[in-house]
Image: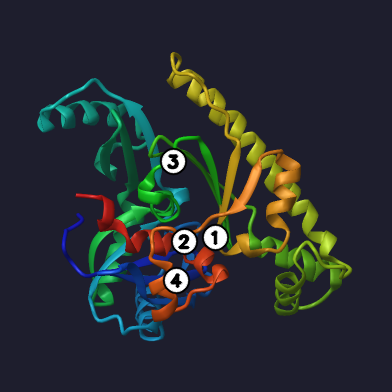
Amino acid sequence: MFLKNKKFFGLDISDLSLKVVQASKTKEGFVVSAFGFCDIPSGIIEKGELKDEEALSKLILSCLKNSQGEAIKTKNVVCSLPEERSFIDVFQVPSIEEKEQLEQVVLSEAENRIPFPLSEVYYDFEVVSKEVILAACPKKIVDPYFNSLKRAGLFPLGMDIESLAIARAIFVNKKENAPTLIVDFGQNKTSFFVFSKKAVRLTSTVPCSAKMLTLSIAQALKISTEKAKALKETEGLCGKQKGLEAMVPVLNELVERIKAYLSYYKSHLSENYPGEKMQNVSRLLLCGGGANLKGLAQFLQEQLNVDVSLANPLINFNLKVQAEKLKIKQDKALSLTTALGLSQKDIYED
């Protein structure tokens, strides 16, 4: 679906928010020319499934109109597809030079690997370092998003699963040798995936979220969610305010979910790559708006005994030029991670 040499913007659509990024290529390097945020009222999208196409289309137009930086005039868009509704698998195939023969081999594998009838999904694949990255999403999930974009007068050049866009945003030219765990800590969910050998491997989505932390504080202190959110953002895990310990049970659950995921990841690799030398995941990168919680990286590092740090979603941009044209603080960049990856889709792909 993706077309080369077209001006476009990236649009990250989640249950509770819209994020838009338009990037431009300059002589000095790649820079963000516009970005924006917009909240989505509950009920329009539920667990990745779009319920109201018209309402979403109006919100998209409002988000574009109120974006910062240059006016977004292009109608071309590359948007995200919900991680929890999508499927990604990586497998090895024999060296095949002819494209048609390779497509037949992948089709045969796809029928066995994708947990839906192929007639009910959209799927695509990419060959990276002698491995095939297979991605799929049910048509009943994709079509409403496509329709909503068309209602807004936009032309979808492509759609990308969230984890693929994130990997594009936080790794230099998508190169990473040692297996790295990515934790996308969002407002309504958290997604995990390991990035290794230029490929996204074994994605998972859990209900632990930044919103749950806010609700925990609100209930413990008997205050409004607005005040609880402000307290959370101000104090994080480093403050002394009574009630912040209410976040710990949610964070402990997140830790247990990460441990369970890593355990399953190791067993999955040993089953699918029996002759390959196993490399332990010793590094964790945090992204998403929830990653801005003060003290979160240190808490996870102590609990998991791995190196934990915040991802840099602007790693592929010319930061010197960016600072002169349109300043983006780290907290904003982390929230825009997926949209930043979508906006760069044509850098590495032919």
The x and y percentages for residue 46 are: 50, 61
Q: Are marks 2 and 3 in contact (CB under 8 Å)?
A: no
Q: Residue at x 54, y 60 (%)?
A: 288
Amino acid type of the residue that numbered disc 2 sits on in the rendered structure? Thr
In the picture, measured across the screen, residue 119 lies left or right of residue 257, that is: left
Amino acid type of the residue that numbered disc 4 sits on in the rendered structure? Leu
Q: Is residue 96 visible?
A: yes
> Mark on residue 288?
1
Secondary structure at badge 1 equals: loop
Q: Residue at x 44, y 18 (%)?
A: 276
| Front label number (2 vs 3) | 3
| Front label number (4 vs 3) | 3
Disc 4/disc 2 C-alpha distance (Å):
12 Å
Disc 1/disc 4 C-alpha distance (Å):
13 Å
The x and y percentages for residue 301 are: 71, 45
Badge 2: residue crowd in 10 Å (few <14, some 14–19, many ≥20): many
Q: Which one is earlier in the sequence, the residue at label 1 or at label 4?
A: 4
Q: Which residue is mark 4?
A: 18
Q: Are marks 1 and 2 in contact (CB under 8 Å)?
A: yes
Secondary structure at badge 2 equals: helix
Q: Quadrant of the N terminus?
A: bottom left
Badge 1: residue crowd in 10 Å (few <14, some 14–19, many ≥20): many
